[in-house]
Image (spheres, grey):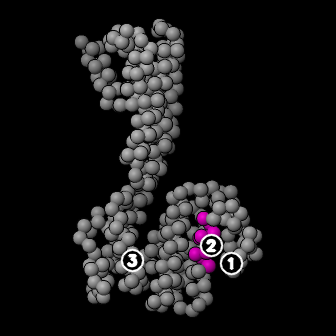
Amino acid sequence: MGEQVLDELRSERQELQRLLLPGPAGVWRRRLGTPPVDGERPAGQERLSNRERRILGDPEVRKNVEILAARLADAMDCHQRAKLPETTAKRLAELVWEAREALSLETLLDTRRSVEELLLECADPLLLRQWTAAEYAEEEATLPTWRRLYGPEPPALLDHPDPPDQAVEVTRMRLLRLVAARFWLYRPLRARRKLRTIYLRYLAPVVLLFGLLLGVAIAREVPPAAGTVLLAAAAGASGASLSGLLKFRDEAKLGAQIREFLAFYMAQVIVGGMFGLLVFLVITAGWLDLGGNPARIGAVSFAAGFSEPFALGVVAKLTERASG
């Protein structure tokens, strides 16, 4: 492979890294056919659009840009040890350029898969060993990992300082299969997550609207003062917000869980407020005797918002009493 193609790989890697820079240095991109030039306003470069800069604000986009840059670095290191086919190197550079020109998460994901498959097909044993070690170390993820797909037994390539050709090819095929499985499963997972979020945008306002109407109706028709109604709703919402925060700290560990957490967290706060109003109605109806003490009402409403099983238990008891 000629030095010109190697320079193209190096140039594309620099452009990917430039996209991640903060401030003025990170808002320019090189146009096709112009060499990179250092400086705040490089010659032959154009400013990123507002849409592209907004896309680069997505942590998932930035993660995939970083991974692509790392893959190009792997390609250059592999070339230093064993010459890559010139057609492969040119295609790697073209793929990354195309991803920068049509910058979006979907384009980056398609490009990442193509880049990884091209690189795996011609990777030398050292790169395969490094890649396999990184994949084998991945224990918990939303998508398939090496251990989940092939079991806990260490890959044969890691056990031999000078692995036989058969171990190299088996590892290559396993890595290719892992890459394909990961990307095939990611698209429906991402589509379902987006669909859940879209529907939640319609459902949550409906619940909020009727919750507000219920609160206003209770304040108007049911003694005591409206302040106690507000206390019950606020305490329930506060309990739900604290419960959600603890769940985020202890349970939201994977990227997919973190990305969809906020929308459902806000919906849970609304549900907590509704449970608080329910507790107020149960107490006011005399089905739960707390002596009309606002502090007790607030405490029980907070517990109902914090613990969904507790609130559902109240609903179950209410249903039993009404049936009786």
Residue 200: image location, x then y, percent: 47, 39
Tag 1: amino acid: Pro
Q: Measured from the top left, where is residue 299 in percent x and y?
A: 40, 22
Of the residues shown, which amino acid type is indicated by label 2?
Glu
Residue identifier under label 3: 130
* Circle 1: element type: loop
Q: Is residue 145 visible?
A: yes
Residue drawn at (28%, 88%) of the image: 164
Residue that badge 1 annotates: 36
Q: Residues within 10 Å of mark 1 (few under 14, many from 20)?
A: some
Neighbour class for label 3 at 10 Å: few (<14), some, many (≥20)? some
Q: Say whether disc 3 or disc 1 marks the residue closer to the N-terminus.
A: 1
Count every numbered label the image shows and give the total: 3
Q: Which mark is residue 15?
A: 2
Query: Quick check: is 127 in the magenta stretch?
Result: no
Residue extent of the magenta highlight: 11-20
Q: Is 193 placed above or below 154 here?
A: above
Q: Nearer the viewer, residue 286 or 95?
A: 286
Judged left or right of residue 50, residue 72 is: left
